[in-house]
Amino acid sequence: MLISSSAEPAVGRRERLDALALLIGGVALWGVGVLGGIRWQEMSDLGFVSVLPVTCLVGLGFLVAGFVRALAMPVVVPGVLQAHVVALVAVLHATPTLVYGTMRYPWAWKHVGVIDFITRNGVVDPSIDTLGAYHGWPGFFALGAMIAETTGMDPASMGRWWPLAVNLLVVWLLSVLFAVCTSDRRVGPVACWTYVLGSWVGQDYFSPQAMAFVMYLTAVVVLVCLTGARRPVSLRLPNRTTPVLGRLGAASSRALSRVGRGVRRLGPASVRKRLGVVPREVYVLAIAIACSHQLTPVMLALTCTVLVVGAWAGTPWLATVVVGVGAAWAVAFAAPLLVDNADELATVGSVGSNLDGTVVDLAAVSSGQAVVAGSARVLTLLVIGVALTGLLREWRRGRTHGLMAVLAGLPVLLVGLSSYGGEVLFRVVLFALPALAFLAATLLVADRSRRGGAALVAIASAVLLPLFLLAHLGNERQYAFGTDEVELVQDLYATAPPGSLLVEGSRNYPTQSLRYEAFTYVPIDREPVDGRRRVLADPAEVLGEWLDNEAYTATYLLLTRSMVAATEASGSLPPGSINAMDAALAADPRFVEVARNAAGVVWGRAADHTAVAGDGGAGAR
């Protein structure tokens, strides 16, 4: 019996049009919600999700439905799937930029301050007391200064769109890497989709880590795709009917064979031949990473070593070069910082204490922030659990994704090195997530029917998306800065004389973004407990003593809206403390408002400052 061959393509066309219609409708609904106005100043401790319009949430639902519909097509069209991934990245990471109108996150503003220092002075100073680590690894900041001077672009303007650009670059790199890791055309897009929904750690802000992570992924992609001689990154194991011990023996034999090949490649050969295996661009990336970030060179060296020993890439000398360049840079240019922070070496191997320095104390934060922190933990554990289940399923079906399994587990070694300023777990998740997402995708769609895989992706998205919104955007109440707060702070930095004392309610504001080395900073919420109690018991008297310090050319007290959000969320100060300070100083004639607008207030001593008329805003209240 003859059947028209146009029947199945017609179904595919219809489903493709359905998926594209859902994609367009989702983006349109999200745009309507954003253009309709989001009153982000009214966010609760649950963050951005607490003020998202219903139209935005429905738009996200349309995007998920479109992606699932595209997965269910008779013929996989990667372009349609990838378009949904790009749209998801855009709506999730461009929205804060569009809504706030300014760069988010306080540490991003410190990075602008370092760029400003380099622009004004033309040099770096690794011995500087404040933000000295950035001067020891200045690659990111020097590049930012060069771009700013060449184009005239404000670094803060670059920083606004940085998260969107970084996430799009990462998704593109991962799509290239995943394409060589499997022959299933659905796994790569689903892995990218899972990565976007699992990437809550927020290391995509305007920072050296974000740039170094992109360069790290670029190096991995180049090494695996170009120098691996097209070796399969997934081993085929014996049939499932083979006894378990037999399969384990075969897998061990293959693994030892890989190690043997890798070790043999380190044997006697000319250095020129060894170096020639790797494209020059990878060495350039290694050098750029070494001068830009402290932790990423370690991760790159570990990864290159594994790629060599596992024979996944032809990189016999690259690991040595990476270690050598990183060590040489640290000794030659960052020696003062290493000497000053020698006590950090004592934490090497202290896994327990390093973890304790990272995990948030849920009892100390507000109830909303406890939900946010809990969502991040659940999201991470879910992704890890699904990835491990996927790895086990693939092994049982006769495949082992050795490269991805190693890349997922390798970052755990970072925990033994240091707490990394209380952020080591964030960095572990950052580096492990791409491989975890790939392994999770194999569980969701590999060797499944198109409808069965689509259904699993729908269920996974329905669980992961709400957790992502809480985990990634749950801190936005303290990370969001309006133009009014930025203007208040920048005016203070621009006009305060060098040698001034800046007393801050908290370090959470667009901090140290201009002439940062000219001032001394004293955040109230970081004072010892007894000191905070004294301030709260009698704000006017105690703060008056601080501001009367004649060792400084001028003294100021800065209180802003974002400081209120941060101290209430973290529990570092009792609710209402900053507003109480503002009210106490307003009632005391010894203090004068240097500047005030709707986002905050700058106070000074009446004997030292002339009041500047504000706009009558409500200040930090």
Image (cartoon, grey):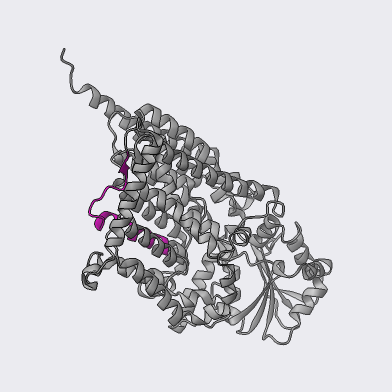
Any magenta on residue 219?
Answer: yes
Tell me if residue 605 comes above or below residue 238 in the rendering. Answer: below
Farthest left residue? 2
Question: Where the N terminus falls, by quadrant?
Answer: top left
Residue name at image x 39 percent, y 43 percent:
191
Q: Position of residue 13 (x, y in %)?
A: 27, 29
Camera sees residue 83: no
> In the shown orientation, is residue 215 left or right of residue 359?
left
Magenta part of the chain: 212-237
Front residue of 338 and 606: 338
> In the shown orientation, is residue 205 left or right of residue 240?
right
Q: Position of residue 60 (x, y in %)?
A: 47, 39
Front residue of 229 and 370: 229
Indicate the quadrant where residue 14 lies: top left
Question: Where the C terminus falls, by quadrant?
Answer: bottom right
Indicate the quadrant where residue 78 lies: top left
